Image (cartoon, rainbow, N blue to C red):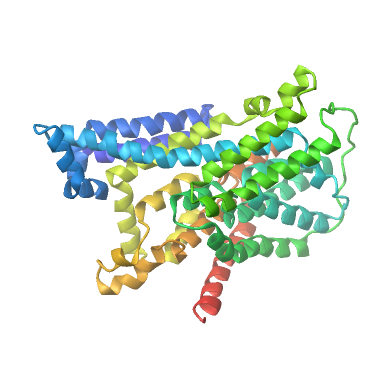
């Protein structure tokens, strides 16, 4: 029991270190990697005691299935400690490593493609066309642009692109803070309904909880209204025009031609959009489609820049772009997902899931709590935790439960309401606080947005959008799908 509690205590301490990254001046990736290893160390050192508690459903299946029989056939004198360690190392870690690797390779491929487009200034094809200085019009243009760009690319990258653009469009700092904050809300909303728009939705898609077409169809309207409700409120409050900053010319050297910018923009965006198509056609994991697209872009950059000077070619080919990719973010996800996998393996998440069922037993209440919590705690481990708490239900599995529970359990089938709401809640709930999402943290870093200022000016708007979107999902379910 001590090891079981110690795993949770170490997770809380590690997560605190991640949350206080700037205060303790230790990068969150380092804290996450240590956390990811330490919880597994505690688990395996006290494995017999932890597994004997009976919270690990995987261990029960291993004992009741052929796994333990095969092990004892090979090692007939293996004691409980050896059995537990073999199970952890050769079953649980290998299984989780496969799931985590799919997410990491998907993210690495997506980040490289987007960075390649950005390095070629491909996004200027969009941003250079924004001419208005009216505050309300500019806010709507940027929000809608952010919403759809986030769905195609991802919310983090889109936020970086649009917030960077803001420095060329808005001179006043507080006005720019407000615009950047609304961009965060739009980016998280846009990423929530797209299978490639947010890490949490990517995790649910890769994990098989949702399919690409269904998540778009079911979460699109709630996500739209998550953005629209705050925008409408702000439109009645905001007046006047923005003052544009005076930009100096000649700051950056042009390395690319107009043709190259357009080519890389359309090839890159096309590669991202092709991923769901690839999965549908081949039934292979999405990361393979992403790596396929990256391979195509890699060849294109090598071909179009082969006659350029070495210095320019190194900056523009994928080989050079890879040096600019945010690798610490990949390590952060590796560490935090590994830590959550350990808690899932030991049975912490199953225990938490039972507690939520007993105290809430309602998918809207559970997901509303997860979404609000994601404004404080990173939505990646929250989503991973929810995926570990609740298995993907099937009709045959639901039939093994009491008759009164079957209807509730069917919310957890693939493309069920629970997973759709989880994608929405975990994706958009982070907007409630500036530190609650990767997009918010990026905007905070770029514009030095004050945490307390965001709470006073933006959090209530984000809450309106968050609960308004959940209400739209409920209406959509009741009026459209239940009626039909």
Locate residue 67, reporting x and y percent: 21, 43
Q: Residue at x 20, y 36 (%)?
A: 84
Locate residue 101, reporting x and y percent: 45, 37
Q: Residue at x 45, y 58 (%)?
A: 369
* Quadrant location of the N terminus in the rendered image: top left
- Image-based side of 91 in relation to 14, left or right: left
- Residue 205 makes an appearance in the image: yes
Tell which residue pokes out farthest to the bottom in this image: 483
Q: Residue at x 77, y 30 (%)?
A: 304
Image vertical order of residue 386 relative to residue 472, above or below = above
- Residue 339 makes an appearance in the image: no
Image vertical order of residue 192 relative to residue 336, above or below = below
Residue in front for this viewpoint, 289 or 247: 289
Locate residue 305, reporting x and y percent: 77, 27
Image vertical order of residue 115 relative to residue 283, above or below = above
Q: Residue at x 66, y 50 (%)?
A: 152
């Amino acid at each position: 029991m001590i090891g079981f509690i110690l795993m949770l205590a170490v997770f809380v301490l590690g997560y605190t270190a991640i949350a206080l990254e700037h205060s303790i001046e230790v990068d969150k990736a380092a804290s996450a990697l240590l956390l990811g290893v330490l919880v597994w160390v505690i688990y395996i050192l006290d494995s017999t005691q932890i597994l004997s508690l009976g919270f690990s459903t995987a261990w029960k299946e291993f004992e009741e299935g052929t796994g333990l029989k095969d092990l004892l056939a090979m090692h007939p004198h293996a004691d409980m400690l050896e059995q537990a360690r073999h199970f952890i190392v050769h079953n649980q870690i290998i299984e989780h490593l496969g799931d985590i690797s799919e997410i990491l390779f998907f993210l690495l491929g997506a980040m490289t493609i987007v960075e390649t487009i950005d390095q070629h200034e491909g996004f200027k094809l969009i941003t250079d066309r924004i001419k208005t200085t009216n505050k309300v019009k500019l806010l709507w243009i940027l929000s809608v642009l952010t919403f759809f760009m986030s769905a195609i690319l991802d919310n983090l990258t889109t936020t970086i692109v649009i917030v960077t653009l803001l420095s060329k469009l808005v001179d006043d700092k507080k006005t720019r803070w407000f615009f950047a904050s609304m961009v965060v809300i739009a980016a998280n909303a846009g990423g929530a309904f797209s299978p490639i728009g947010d890490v949490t939705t990517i995790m649910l898609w890769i994990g098989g909880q949702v399919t690409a077409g269904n998540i778009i169809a079911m979460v699109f309207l709630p996500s739209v209204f998550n953005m629209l409700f705050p925008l409408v409120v702000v439109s009645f409050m905001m007046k006047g025009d923005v003052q544009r900053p005076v930009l100096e010319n000649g700051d950056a050297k042009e390395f690319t031609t107009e043709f190259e910018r357009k080519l890389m923009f359309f090839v890159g965006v096309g590669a991202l959009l092709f991923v769901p198509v690839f999965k549908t056609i081949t039934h292979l994991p999405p990361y393979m489609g992403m790596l396929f697209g990256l391979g195509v872009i890699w060849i294109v950059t090598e071909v179009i820049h082969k006659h350029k000077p070495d210095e320019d070619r190194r900056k523009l080919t994928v080989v050079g772009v890879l040096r600019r990719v945010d690798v610490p973010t990949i390590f952060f996800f590796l560490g935090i997902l590994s830590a959550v996998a350990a808690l899932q393996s030991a049975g912490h998440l199953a225990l938490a899931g039972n507690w939520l069922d007993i105290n809430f037993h309602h998918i809207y209440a559970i997901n509303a709590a997860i979404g609000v919590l994601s404004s404080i705690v990173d939505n990646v481990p929250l989503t991973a935790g929810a995926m570990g708490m609740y298995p993907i239900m099937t009709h045959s599995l639901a039939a093994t439960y009491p008759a009164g529970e079957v209807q509730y359990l069917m919310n957890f089938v693939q493309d069920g309401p629970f997973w759709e709401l989880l994608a929405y809640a975990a994706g958009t709930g982070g907007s409630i606080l500036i530190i609650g999402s990767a997009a918010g943290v990026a905007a905070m870093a770029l514009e030095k947005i004050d945490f307390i200022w965001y709470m006073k000016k933006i959090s209530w708007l984000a809450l309106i959008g968050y609960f308004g979107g959940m209400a739209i999902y409920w209406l959509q379910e009741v009026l459209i799908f239940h009626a039909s």
